[in-house]
Image (cartoon, grey):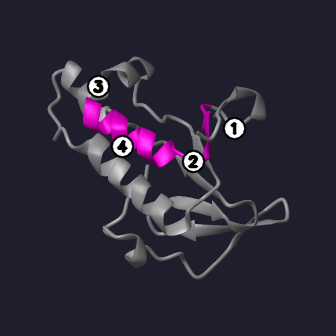
């Protein structure tokens, strides 16, 4: 899940280290993402969009701003790095059926951050389980 106290892209620092994976350098971002600079790819995981709605359905009330907050942080990362591609690993929606319940403004925000870039929704870390959304 993207977590950060930073609100603006110019405040969003990359951490002063690199993570090497199979010889590829990934830049950790304080918001909880990784940026693969040589591929212009942002990697995020476990966004858990609509988590508040899932808990509310079970009688546990959480503030209803979790999706908006996560989308704002995601937009900040995308503004900062302008990736060609985004890979969203893991539980992007807290429960898959909740994807249909996104309100109109959250749906538009999600469409805005996807626009102009390739987007991969991956629910397991294998290339076979990724669905690609072509850049529009």
Q: Quadrant of residue 11?
A: bottom left
| Residue pictured at 44% horizontal, 39% vertical | 111
Residues at badges 3 and 2 in contact (C-beta under 8 Å)?
Answer: no
Numbered label attached to residue 125? 1
Q: Earlier in the sequence, mark 4 or mark 1?
A: 4
Q: Quadrant of residue 127?
A: top right
Against 94, is 89 above or below?
below
- In this view, the mark in front (1 or 2): 2
Residues at badges 3 and 4 in contact (C-beta under 8 Å)?
Answer: no
Q: Is residue 13 left or right of residue 130?
A: left
Residue 121 magenta-drawn?
A: yes
Residue 33 magenta-drawn?
A: no
- Give residue 52's position: percent from left, percent from top: 25, 34
Q: Residue furthest right?
A: 23
**Range covered by the magenta-colored residues:** 104-123
Q: Is residue 22 left or right of residue 93?
A: right
Numbered disc 3: secondary structure? helix
| Residue marked by disc 3 | 54
| Residue marked by disc 4 | 109
Pointer 4 local density, CA inside 10 Å: few below 14, some 14–19, many at least 20: some
| Residue pictured at 60% horizontal, 58% vertical | 83
Residues at badges 4 and 1 in contact (C-beta under 8 Å)?
Answer: no
Give how far apart the Cα atoms at labels 1 and 3 are. Answer: 24 Å
Q: Earlier in the sequence, mark 1 or mark 2?
A: 2
The quadrant of the image that shows the C terminus is top right
Give how far apart the Cα atoms at labels 1 and 2 are. Answer: 24 Å
| Residue marked by disc 2 | 116
- In this view, the mark in front (4 or 1): 4
Q: Is residue 122 left or right of residue 9?
A: right
- Give residue 30's position: percent from left, percent from top: 46, 69
């Amino acid at each position: 899940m993207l977590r950060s106290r930073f609100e603006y892209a110019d405040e969003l620092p990359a951490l002063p280290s690199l993570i090497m994976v199979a010889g590829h350098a990934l830049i950790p971002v304080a918001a909880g993402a990784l940026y693969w600079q040589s591929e212009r790819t942002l990697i995020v995981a476990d966004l858990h969009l609509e988590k508040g709605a899932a808990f509310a359905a079970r009688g546990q009330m959480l503030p209803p701003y979790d999706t908006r907050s996560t989308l704002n942080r995601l937009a900040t990362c995308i503004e900062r790095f302008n990736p060609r591609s985004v890979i969203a690993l893991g539980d992007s929606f807290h429960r898959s059926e909740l994807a249909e319940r996104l309100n109109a403004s959250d749906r538009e925000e999600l469409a805005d951050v996807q626009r102009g870039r390739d987007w991969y929704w991956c629910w397991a870390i294998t290339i076979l389980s990724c669905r690609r959304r072509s850049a529009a």
